[in-house]
Every structure is written in C-alpha cells, then in structure tokens.
Image (cartoon, coloured by chain):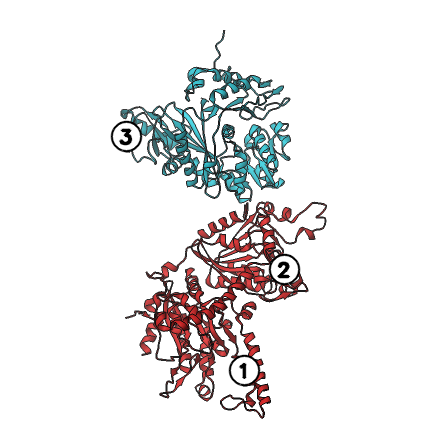
Chain colours: A red, B cyan
Amino acid sequence: MAKLTLEPIGTPRERALDETTYRAQRTHLEGLNAALRAKRDEVRAGWGPEYRARVEKKGKLSTWDRIERLKDAGSPVLSVGTLVNYGRVFGEERKSSPGAGVVTAFVRVEDRWVVAIANDNTVASGSWWPQTPEKIQRAQEIALRLRLPVVYLVDCSGLFLPEQAHTFPGREGAGAIFRMNALLSDAGVPQIAGVHGDCIAGGGYMPIISDVVYMTEQAYMVIAGAALVKGAKSSKITSLSIGGPDVHVHLSRCADHRVPDDDALLTSVRREVAKLPGSACAYYRYGAQAAPPRHAPEELDGLFPVDHRHAYDMREVLARLTDHSLFHEFAPATGPEMICGLARVSGLYAGFVANNLALTDHPVHGGVKRPGGILYRDGIAKVAQFSRACNDDGIPIVWLQDIAGFDIGPEAEKEGLLGYGSSLIYANSTNTVPMFTVLLRKASGAGYYAMAGLPYAPILQLATPLTRLAVMEGRTLAIGAFNSKLDDDFKIVAASEREAAEIAKGMEAVEARIARDMDPVLAASQRDVDEIVTPGELRLWVCSAIEMAYQAIGARRVKNPRIFSFHDLDRLIR
Amino acid sequence: MFKRVLVANRGEIAARVIRACRELGIETVAVYSEADRDAPWLSGATATVCLGPAKASLSYLDQDAVLQAADQTEARAIHPGYGFLSENAVFAARCAQQGIAFIGPTPASIRLMGDKLEAKRTMAAAGVPTIPGSLGALRSADEAAALAERVGYPVLLKAAAGGGGKGMRRCDDARALPRAFSEAALEAQHAFGDPRLYLEKFLEGGRHIEFQVLADTYGRAVHLGERDCSVQRHHQKLVEESPSPAIGAAERADLGARAAAAAASFGYVSAGTLEFLRDASGGLVFMEMNTRLQVEHPVTELCTGIDLVREQIGIAANRPLSMTQDGIRFSGHAIELRINAEDPDAGFAPDPGLVTAVSIPASPGGGVTVRWDGGVAAGWRVPPHYDSLVGKLIVHAADRPAAIAAAREALSALRLDGIKTTIPLHHRILDDPDFVAGTYDVSFLERKALAAVPRG
C-alpha cells in the first residue's frame, strides 16, 4: 500500500522541560531576540525621522509604508537582507546604509506571495550602495527560481556615487539587476513596476523591462537628470518635464499608466496582481487543510539551552514546525544522529533534515555512545538518499542545522566519510527541488556544507540569534593552533604557571576572534545568511517558504504522494 | 495632470472644453476645418491645427487627421466633445493604442452601449427598469405572440441587428402580429443581413428623463441627478431642465443609485447619461445610454456645483472621483434653452449667416445665475456644414418659477443679430401654461404647434 502515515511527534512542553529551565531559557533568548528586533527597528527607521518627514512633505509615502499598503491587510512582511550593511559606514562622513537602502520582502498581495523590491526613499534618495545590487539580485533570484511575481516600487536616484567603484562595474554590480529583469521576463515571471519618485540612470532603467509600469504624477524616469543637460537652465528644463508621466506615458510609452499618487499606484498594482493566476497551494494540498502545530511554535523560544554546548531534543523543534505536530520519520533506526522525515506544512508536503543532538548508539560496537550533532557514515548515507528522494518527488526540503561537523579520526577516515560526504554534496548540488536552510544553532565546517549551507544554493538561508557559523568552533581552532602544548585530553601542559596562563590566554584570544566571526549579524551584514529570525518566528517562515515553493503551478516537478520514491525506500530499508 | 489636450470638436462645446482646460492649467490644441478657420473659440486655445475641408467626414470625422494633429502637437489626451467621434469605439481604441488618453469611456463600453439589445440586457441585469419585452432575439412568431400577450399591446417588433426604423413594425393587436413578424424579419434580413427580431412594449408619448452618471477607473460611480428633456421637435431636444418636475426625491435617489451601480457594473468610466422614458403608466424605463458628455450637461452642473468636464479630465488621468454620492447636493433649479441658427417660423430652416452683433445677458445676482455656452461672435459667419446649435442659454435659480422668470428675462436680453434663431420659439415655450405647470411631455411641441406663429 503506497500510503504515507504521519505519526505524532513531540511532547507537551510541561513534560519536555521543567518550568524553571524553560523560563530561564526563554529569558535568555528573549534578550537576544530583543536585540535583534532593535536592530530591525533601526534599519526600518532609515536615515531617521527627518528624512521620513521630507518624503511625507512631498505627499509621498515612506517605503515601508508603501509595503504596508501593498500587502493584504493583516498579512506579514517577511523581509530578507534586512541587516545587509549593518554596522558598515561609508566615506569620510561615515554614512550608514540601513538595509543597503532597499527593502526586499515576501508579502501577500491578493492572496498570492510576491517578491517586493522597494528602494528606501529615506536613505540617500533610494540610491544603490555596495551590496545593494547583490541584495536586489538575491530577491530576483528567489523570484526566478520559484516563479514568484515581482513588484518593484522604484524610488531610486541611481548609484550612490561616492561608492560607484564598488557597485558599477562588477559581474554582480548594478547592471546585473537589469540582466535579472530580462531573465525573469524570459522565464515568464510577471514583473510589475510602480515608479514613485526621482528615478535617475539605474533607477530610470529599473522599471522598463517590467510587464506594466505605473507612474505617479510626481515621478520621473531619466537616463540623466536635468542637471547634466546642457542648456537646461535657460530652457527651464527639469527632470520632471523631460521624464515625467507626461512624456513617458503618452509620448515615449516607456510607462503605461499615470496615477495621481502613491496610494492610487499601490491600488493599481494590487489590481494587476489580481489578474495573475492564483496560487496552486490549494491544489497541492490534496484535500488536506493547513493546520497549526499541536505544540505551540512560540515555545521554540524557550527550548534552547543557555549554554550552546548543551543538547536539546530536536524532535521537539520539529513538533513545533509541522502541521498537527505529525511527522513520518524515514529510517529512524539507521544513522540515528540524523532525523529525516516528511510532514505537512500549511497542508503541503515538506521534507525535513535535522541533527539529533542526543547521544546515539554506535551501530557496531554495542554499548558505545557517540555524541550528537555530528555526521557519521550511516547518517550521511541516509541524508543523501533522503535528499535524492525528495528531489525525485518534488518535495521541498527544510534543513535544520545544529551541527558541529563530520566525525573525525581513524574510523571516520577508514569508513571513507570523505566519499560519503561528497556523495551527499553531489546530490544537494544537483537538486532542483527548492531547499530552505535554517542555521538553528551550530553550523560548522563541512557539516554546514553537507546540510545545504549557502554554497549549495538553497532558496533561502535563515539564521537565529543563536547561530554559530564558522569553519569550526573557537575551541576546536584553539586546540588545533596550540596542539603542541596540549596532552591527549587537550589539557594544557606547561613548564610553569605563567606559561600555562599565557597559553590559556592565547587560546581564549583565538576563541574570541572566532566568536566574533560567528556572530550571525556579521553574516547577515555580508549576505552570508538571508535573514535572522527568532525561533518563535520559524514556523511562520517555514510555512511561507513552503507555500511559495508550491505557488507557481508548472514551475517544477510535483509528484503525487501515491508514487513517492519513499514508498520504494520504505520497502528496502526495514 | 496632462500637459496638453486636443479638443476634437467645434462650436460651443469646443469653447467649453478649452475653458475647463485653461482653468486646470492645461494647454489646448483646437482642431478646425476650413469652414471654421476664423472661428471665435480658436483664440482661446494654445495651438490650432487645420484638419481639412469643411465637410465633416474630411475634417472633424477624419480619425487619421485628428490623430496626426495630436501626434504633431504632442497632445497627451483628446476630448471628443459630443457627436463626431465621441462615441466611436474604434477611434477610442486607436487613441489608447497610441498612448493618447481618450477622455471618455473605454472602447468596450462604447461598443456595449451601442448595441441596443446588449445595453438593455446589461441594464436589466444591474437592476435598472427596462422596457417590458424580450431581452434577446425571438425564436418564432409564436414566442412573439406569447410575449406580446404578457406585455400588453401595442407592441413594437425591432431588428436585433439594426436601427433607423428598418425592420421595425408596430402591432396593435394579436391578429396583426404574425404578418408584422414576417414582414419585419424580411426587411431586417434585407437591410442588415440578419432577420432576428426582438419585441418591446410600444411606448407612446411620455417624458424623456435622463440621469447623469460619473465613474472613475477605480470602479466608483455616482449619479448627479436627472434632467427632463421632453421639449423636443423631431426627437431633437430644445429645452432641458433639472430637476424634472415629474420626479420626486425618493425616486431620484433610487433610480440614480441604480444608474450609477449599472455604470460601475460593466466598468464604465467618465461621464455618461442613461436615458429613460416615463410613459402614461408612470414607470420609468431605460431607453439607451449615451456614452459621452451631453449638450445639456450645464443644467446638472448648475444644480450640483460640479464641473463635469473637469471631472472627465481628472478621470482620464486616473484620478479617483473627487466626490462621494453622499457629498453631492442638489440645489435650486436650472433651465437650458438651445439657441439654434434656424427659423422656427419657416419650418426650422437652417439660417447660417453673418452674425452682426452678440449681446449676452449677465447674471443679475440675487440668487440667479445666467450662463452662456456659446460658439459665436460678432463678425463671424456661421457655416452651413454642421448642426445649427450656436449657443446655450442656461439659468439657475432657487426654484422652478424663479428659474422660468429668470429664463424669460435672460432670453429677452439675449441678442444674436444677423441670423434667425429659435429665440422667439423659446419665448413661446416659456409662456406656455403646460410648460409653466410642468405637465408637458414629448408630444408637447407638436401638439401645441408652437412652431407656427399665428399669422395675421
């Protein structure tokens, strides 16, 4: 019988964790979450209330307000790349570039997920900083791979000129934004543009390839502003007079419709989205309905130990991300250090790969326990085959990372983990099914790669405030660097107490540097993760990602559950 | 807002549109035929373009010439006025194709309302009362007979594919029906290539009452009340007034709301007018919709304080309606007198000629407004090639009696020397007891033979 039975997973929080521990863990994480939210608010404020007031005085909406009016009432704004350029300052004036001056977000418009790309008009007139083009292209790439409609809300004065050397010429420089416009159109992905303000040079080019372009009465698109046109002053030429809706809607036809203001434009854009095919999610639910987990997702904020070295039960995490907290585990007895399985998320089939942090039994040497959060041979093989099967079946994969790395030592080398790991890498590298990676906590070394880290092109890579992303843990690196001074158990061996103290200090310094490197905010700032989310927000993100993966019918293979490869595997692995 | 609008019309309506554009700070391009080369309204425009010879088909109706004029002058929008190209769906489509905003409804709306049966079906579906009869073509004479029994004689059989009186037969009783059906079908086949007929109750006399609607591109529509246009000669309106003496506030609100909703139901935009007939039985039934601005729009403007041409221009620029239904107030009473260059005492023979003097009465104040929408000036020769309307005298006062009195006064002060006009006829109409009582209907003018002045 080719039936897929989902079984309950997880336990009520009161049984899984005692109240004191839960409260302590929650409080600790809430501190981190609050710091994250403060950073988001900082970015949302752009260059500050003075710049916002300037925008509003012109009768325009601020960019974040435009996003609010664009989306369906009561729906979330899932911003990616919020912290790009966080902590960086540019030039002698040390200007900040909040969000790299652009908002890229997934929003619901007329019951469809769309990718919204909106220049931040409170930051240097929406101009492009280092990393702005890459941030925009990342959003376009996601839209291209999932065939999601793109809405551009253009309010962009072109490159931020003092930094042009970093944004103009490169392979992924500003010009690549227009190449992505073309590739999106080439792939039949709808692109709708609204022109809200002064759009100069790059900003002028941004809307043109879109299928339909709306301009407000204040908006203009120009190859170059009137300031560069010889004789403009005596001829009383302004950028608006040469590039406003009067010219582009009627004479050049570079735009299609004129509307009085931002509000009317956003209403019109919503109307365009409503003309597009509806979401295929209802079709691919196969009669099931979206359902919340039985165990509350908000409890995730209290599940993680304060000390990052301590374990927790990953199944409790899975229970709070899946509909009804139901899960079908694939080959639980094989490679128990990895949890692989299928569940429904928002009623849609999704595959999960997650690290088991508990001690597990050695497969051969009875009585020997091995630490979790590590990849051993059978786990790698299980994950590789699971990945292939999901790809085969068109089941999107969610990778939940809390991994210290591969097993090391003589057994690991003899068993050929290099080979097994490469087999897994190969599968992930050649997968076409959408994959979403969440760096829950540890994301170290080859383990980060094996579990579809960013180099393996997941559609999205999310981090949490607990994320520790580095080639290895600081302690491991310190052990490696000071190996000659350590004994078999990695304890310091020194001639004197002073020398021991110096070695200890040296090791601490190494650890501290890595600890700084591991800060997820650094990763987010340089686009090594797409967004940092709180564990309590994970369910929303996973649901949204899975819905986006099923929205565009015809975009990819989706096999019906009757003929999943998993049924064959279940027969073979017993 | 648009930088420049081309006015594809002539005479008083061209002057009217040019005025509205000037008030909005919009440049205008006035197009003219050879016969209108020295026309008085042209001086109000920013630029002018000659379209061609006097004949309308070679000038005002020449789409290529009008579109080329717009191209040459970089006009962003075209206001078609009334008549000429205003209800030409192909022209509206060509404007849209070239990125020129057509100040009026979409080609689809024009086409829909131009098809009498489709228009009737659309209105019926939207809850507007229509003439009792069939909503589609009849399948047989038997079906016609059954329907006629239900609807009540006399009935009218009409060609589904045409108009202009061809394929039409009036039927007074059941005996006459089979023969009338086959005759009408045959005539329709010959005239239009389509023998299908539909049936309507034959309505005689009655009052012509029309509702003004305005709709924007965001699906919002309002009504601006009704106009009574029953003073007609050979189906040509001569006097219009608002409100209609035959309509009460409740009926106005109800039917107006239905009219607005009907317009919104098929995506109508801009100004439009739903024409109704009130027959002897007292009910108002839909006759047709005019998908353009009408000649008599000023009476609505004076009663509501809303400038319809300015609204049309805003709607064409994708502005939302500047008013809600609740915000529209109807106040006072307005009467419009169409002044044609015709001799009412010589069978309304057109009297084009040199206008030697023009004197327009001013508003006397005291709650009375006098408005003149004219297309003549002293020293200008009214050409014979076009319709004979030279201007409209409109008055507004606190109530109907005051409006009639004001109309009489203004009419007496109005002078258009050098040509015969319908001024004397209007005097007689304003003095007529049925008109004063508000009890006139569409047969009023013919019955009273007001056109004929007793000789002797």
Q: Residue under mark 3: which chain is it in?
A: B
Q: Nearer the viewer, residue A58 or B393?
A: A58
Considering the numbered disc 3 on the image, is that residue within a helix, a strand or a loop? Answer: helix
Considering the numbered disc 2 on the image, is that residue within a helix, a strand or a loop? Answer: loop
Three-letter code for the amino acid on which mark 3 is drawn: Arg
Are circles 1 and 2 on residues that touch, CB within 8 Å? no
Q: Is residue B218 above or below residue A469?
A: above
Q: Nearer the viewer, residue A292 or A199?
A: A292
Residue A524, x across and y down, in percent = 54, 68
- State whether discs 2 and 3 lie on one chain: no
Which residue is found at the position 59% from the left and 52% from the top? A53
Q: Which residue is mark 2?
A: A159
**Rounded to the nearest whole Å, what is the CA distance between mark 2 and mark 3?**
75 Å
Q: Residues within 10 Å of mark 1 (few under 14, many from 20)?
A: some
Rendered image: mark on residue A477: 1
Q: Residues within 10 Å of mark 2 (few under 14, many from 20)?
A: many
Task: Please state if A421 lies on the left or on the right of B313 as rendered.
Answer: left
Q: Residue under mark 1: which chain is it in?
A: A
**Rounded to the nearest whole Å, what is the CA distance between mark 1 and mark 2?**
41 Å
Q: Which residue is mark 3?
A: B150
Three-letter code for the amino acid on which mark 1 is drawn: Leu
